[in-house]
Amino acid sequence: MSGYRHPLNDTLFVLDALVGFDRLAADLGLDGVNLELAEAILTEAGKLGSEVLAPLNPVGDRQGATLTAEGVQETPGFAEAYRQYAENGWPALVAAEELGGQGLPAVLGTAVNEIWHSANMAFALCPMLCQGAVEALTVHGSESLKEQYLPKLVSGEWTGTMNLTEPNAGSDLAAVSARAVPHEDHYRITGQKIFITWGDHQMTSNIIHLVLARLPDAPKGVKGISLFIVPKYRLDANGEPGELNDVCCVSLEHKLGIHGSPTCVLSFGDNGGATGYLVGEPHKGLMYMFTMMNNARQAVGLQGLSIAERAYQQARQYARERLQGTRADGTRIPIIEHPDVRRMLMIMKAGTEAMRALALVAMAEDDRTKVPDGQESAHHGRLELFTPIVKGWMTEMAQELTSLNVQVHGGMGFIEETGAAQHFRDARILPIYEGTSGIQALDLIGRKTLSNGGAHLGALFEEMAETLAEFDGQEDADLVAIAEGLGEALAQAKSAADEVLASAVDPALAGSVSFNFMMLMGYLCGGWLMAKSALCADRQRRSGEGDAAYLQSKCVTARFYAEHLLPRVVAHRRTMQAGSGSVMALSVEQF
């Protein structure tokens, strides 16, 4: 069982070299916000993560939440940890100052959130969803609802949830059947929602549910869904929690992993109807909820990085300590010296560094949409393009990297006491919730590529080509290898994109090749950012800046990525070329 230590040096490198954090903060008009402040914030977050949250991670796995007569009781120790998290102001980090937040850049919030999810993903799911609720209400809520609910959500005094899924309405939200009937100054909500993360607990005095439901006159399909606030406790005249609302947890899901996160079946209106309040306009709930969902998709992609980083640290420590084999002089050999173990550790190291770069660069695009420089739409387009790649590719990568942790441990990895199995189990939900990998892939190939004729994708390819041009004339062996790998991968990706854009005649093609296209783009984006990192690290090393050992490691890791992971772009492109033929050839009965 290993502890957790935040990789501060790598995060700061990405913020500086790839994001340009100081310039970004200046463009946002944030006086006094710079890399030095970011380092101080990340250092303090790292302490809370390693000293408070990480020790509770195995506790949550062994002693998950339980359902009692008084509601859901969270894992022992979680309430105290949450209190410390909220009292230290972490929920308010990126919220607007007028709401009681600190107004810091979203990319810094993402860097901090990596810590919470690495330390204890089951715990971190609670504030993650609350941040999404804050964003949805900030953008779409009335002034009255904002005044009533946002300050206490921002402070962490209350938490928020997202209620979409029903027993017969999973990814197909057109099938939502929960009802909302007007009554005096509110609505009466009835129906059942499932898979509601942190749907009930005792850590805060109120829980604010954002619920999708249909009005009596709602049109059929997704255009007839509205969004409502349904508090666990109705507010009294002073805006404080009063009477218990007509919403309760009727059961907890028994899950493969994240046992410390209560996943609830919530029943609304068993006693006449839960009191709810309309958010925004009628019948626009799905559009409003996507504000929260897109936030969550970026956050889930980040979870892929976080759990992979935790697994990598565990595998690295075990490989250093586990002795297997004897030298001629009789000394034992730690398995980290074995080439195949090195191969696995390097895949984990290169994968996590590429994911961290992508997660932070993607979220920086969100910050740049708020800079009035005339490029807001371009940054929004880049963010939209990155979102399914972050969510889809990074969570799929987490499956491989957490599995490699088990493999590095050998037989001990299959034993629960080592903790390797927990990371593997916890990671398995990531390609599923907030939109499966298949949904992300269809989004990338459809709404983010075909719908705009590949314009946003083309702009990204152009920027990658500019990075590739910076390698011209380089003689360093690491940089030469990186350039070769990136050049081949970029050429393959361009060809794959051209084929997709020219293939409208086959209605089954997009769905058949979309997953491979998403994975291709993920490996390419990771390789591009690792290449940019290597260029910057090489410049710093030659000028005598920074930690020489870290910078040399950065270049070697980028070369490993180019040689071992970028070739997967070629494989995914080759698979795409097969089209939909064999995918769709069998009849349903032949399966």
Image (cartoon, rainbow, N blue to C red):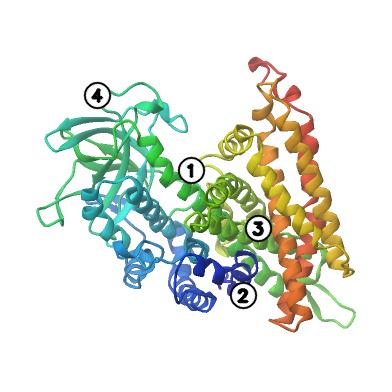
The residue depicted at 65 percent of the width and 69 percent of the height is 17
Q: Secondary structure at mark 4?
A: loop
Comparing 145 with 232, the one in front is: 145
Q: Earlier in the sequence, mark 3 or mark 1?
A: 3
> Type of residue at label 4?
Pro
Residue 142 % position (x, y): 25, 46
The residue depicted at 38 percent of the width and 40 percent of the height is 288
Residue 557 % position (x, y): 75, 66
Residue 177 location, quadrant: top left
Residue 245 % position (x, y): 18, 44
Q: CA distance from mark 3 to mark 4?
A: 52 Å
Q: Earlier in the sequence, mark 1 or mark 4?
A: 4
- The answer to the question of whether label 4 and label 2 lie on touching residues, with beta carbons closer than 8 A, is no
The residue tagged 1 is 434
The residue depicted at 37 percent of the width and 64 percent of the height is 91
> Type of residue at label 2?
Asn
Q: Residues within 10 Å of mark 4 (few under 14, many from 20)?
A: few
Quarter of the rendering occupied by the C terminus: top right
> Type of residue at label 1?
Glu
- Image height check: is 327 above or below 69? below
Q: Secondary structure at mark 3?
A: helix
Q: Residues within 10 Å of mark 1 (few under 14, many from 20)?
A: many
The residue tagged 4 is 216
The residue tagged 2 is 9
- The answer to the question of whether label 2 and label 1 lie on touching residues, with beta carbons closer than 8 A, is no
> Type of residue at label 3?
Val
The residue tagged 3 is 406
Q: Is residue 336 left or right of residue 448?
A: right
Q: CA distance from mark 2 to mark 1?
A: 30 Å
Q: Nearer the viewer, mark 2 or mark 1?
A: 2
